[in-house]
Image (cartoon, rainbow, N blue to C red):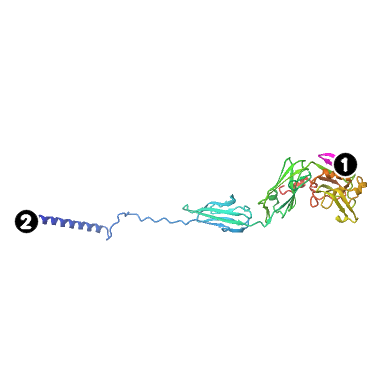
Amino acid sequence: MRKRGRTRSAVRGVGALVVMLAMVLVAGCQADSGSGSPIQANANPGKGVATPKKTVAPAKVAVSPADRAENVAVDAPVTVAANGGALTQVEVTNDGKPVEGTLNPAKTSWSVAEGSLLPDRVYQVHAVAKNADGQETQTNQTFTTAKPAKVLGTSIEPLDGSTVGVGMPIVIKFTVPVKDRAEVEKRLVVETSKPVEGAWHWFSSEEVHYRPRTYWPAHTDVTLRINTKDVNAGDGAWGIKDKVRHFSITNSVVTKVDLNNSHTARVYIDGRLARSIPVTGGKSGWETRNGTKVILEKRENVLFKNEAIGALEHYRLTGRWALRMTWSGEFLHTASWSVASQGNSNTSHGCVGMNLSNSDWLWHVSHVGDPVEVMSSHGDQMPATGNGYGDWNVSWNEWKAGSALS
């Protein structure tokens, strides 16, 4: 029994010794830390804690004109600018058609090229910019341009589908003055079924004519294309639509009238003399105009009276067949009352008169647009425009010089 009690006491002593050693070890570890706080397991001696990455702000995109702006002038500046980044894509379109523009070297600003906008259009703007981190900023806007201040309309001779003589010029009259003649003339296209050397000639800012170097070849088909839609004619005038006109040239009928010596009208059909007709022309003070004219219209039973031209003599005379050469009143016509003078003297007030039979024949073989070449040494020169079609009285070199593209 004593032996067993001694053993228990020994065990108790060993256990106490173990507990004391453990306490010493713990105390020693705490003293090495230099403080009363425990050491963290993930501590990395010699390095600090990592700094969080700084966030870069998104790029900003500014567009001028403002979104949904209306009545924007066609010459207004259109710009796209990026702040805090670079532009990577800019598209300005109308009905899917891109507008030309320029990007600056820094890729921070884009602008529309001058003259690229059209009136009365809705434009879409799409722009993309990236900041330094590659983050994209997109912008989508629209703006609407103003309607044109002036509309460039046209009236055209010959009429569409007409058949005219070999001397007929193409005449275009504009509803408003054309400031940029070259830009408009580039859009006037003449197509012919036979080779023709021709040119445009501007008589004013509102009137331009086209004629060949010589008379049209007989039986030529002509197509005129007026491609003036969206053309800036200058000074606020714009074309708003295109036009196409077709006409045909007849056989060649050229009448040559000599009022100086023979007092005869010689009619050439397709280059051959078809008939010589005795005529009378304008008397002293009323001389028939000299130069080449073009038949403007064919009329029947025309009443000629002194009030129409301011003549002192009183008369009322009806010409059965009449071919107008000037708007002021020169005709080739029936003059049954002056048969005795026809072929030998000039007794009219400016018209070229002939008997009933010859005027009947000439009227029926002639066309609007046929040239009439009058030799009247005492008469005033037929003007190139303003009193009919005197285009053929301008030399070819002078005619070409009247082109805006010469």
The answer to which of 356 and 397 lies nearer the viewer is 356
On the image, the x and y values in percent for residue 11 come to: 13, 55
- Kindly indicate whether the residue at mark 2 contacts the one at mark 1 (C-beta within 8 angstroms): no
Q: Earlier in the sequence, mark 1 or mark 2?
A: 2
> Farthest residue in the top direction?
272
Does the segment drawn in magenta span residue 235?
Answer: no
On the image, the x and y values in percent for residue 242 come to: 68, 49
Q: Is residue 78 above or below residue 364?
A: below
| Numbered range of the magenta stretch | 266-276
Left or right: 40 with respect to 121? left
Crowd rating for badge 2 (residues with CA inside 10 Å; few <14, some 14–19, many 20+)? few
What residue would you read off at disc 1?
Answer: 276
Is label 2 in a helix, a strand or a loop? Answer: helix
Q: Amino acid at mark 2?
A: Arg
What residue would you read off at disc 2?
Answer: 2
The answer to which of 21 and 119 lies nearer the viewer is 119
Task: State which quadrant residue 30 falls in.
Answer: bottom left
Q: Amino acid at mark 1?
A: Ser
